[in-house]
Amino acid sequence: MTNKKRFIEFLENSERNFDVVKTLKKFEEFFSYLVSENEFVNLISRKMDKNDYWTKHFLDSLIPMYLFDFNNKSVLDFGTGGGLPGIPLKLVFCKMRTHLLDSKLKKINVIKKIVKKLDLKDVYSISTRLEDMDSKWNLKFDYIVCRSVKIERRYKNHLLRLLKNDGKLILYKSKMMDDIFQFNNRKIHEFEFEEIGLRRIVEITK
């Protein structure tokens, strides 16, 4: 089974209410834009086989859909890089209000282009450091997702202040878990996929 077919199977077997055919078309567009833009700005490791995007990036980004409904929620993707996991989640949860944060302006500029090409609504790109987000963002988000950044201690209070009082921080982890122990109220959900291996989704409630 090809990686793309495995991803299609994953979408079809999910219990979320969305149009799989329409959603897959958007993922195909996203894939095409990522491959093209990655030639100029390093959004994703160029060493990775492009066919692996379907499982190691797209499928992986969507694992929290087993646990959470992001529709009608405000979500911050901290350290979005190539728009992951924020854009894949948005493609499934169309009513999600999505903010894509990265400190590297050149990456954010590319993400803005991709979001426009995909014609995604309620998606906003922010180029700044987490620490520099001012008080207008306090208590803004229902969820903060983070897939590719180690949560250093200097990030902790900033992440918590941006969350609503009942908000959740969702961390994508595998073997390295040392950064989660600074948080109380944490719950670990384990998933295993042949193409990805062990993936731990860490749910931290404010």
Image (cartoon, helix red, strand yellow):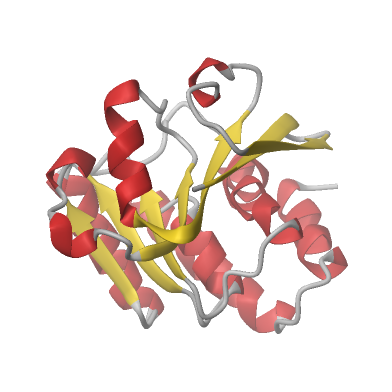
Q: Which image quadrant is residue 162 in? A: bottom left
Q: Is residue 131 above or below residue 68?
A: above
Instruction: Determine if residue 5 is in view.
Output: yes
State left or right for residue 82 relative to residue 71: left
Q: Is residue 115 above or below residue 196?
A: below
Q: Is residue 66 above or below residue 60?
A: below
Residue sitting at x 55%, y 21%: 181
Q: How far from the left and from the top, in percent, is residue 112?
A: 24, 65
Residue nearest the observer in this picture, 141 or 98: 141
Residue nearest the observer in this picture, 71 or 106: 71
Residue sitting at x 58%, y 74%: 93
Residue sitting at x 41%, y 38%: 44
Q: How far from the left and from the top, in percent, is residue 110?
A: 24, 56
Q: How far from the left and from the top, in percent, is residue 204?
A: 56, 42
State left or right for residue 95 relative to residue 186: left
Residue nearest the observer in this picture, 106 or 136: 136
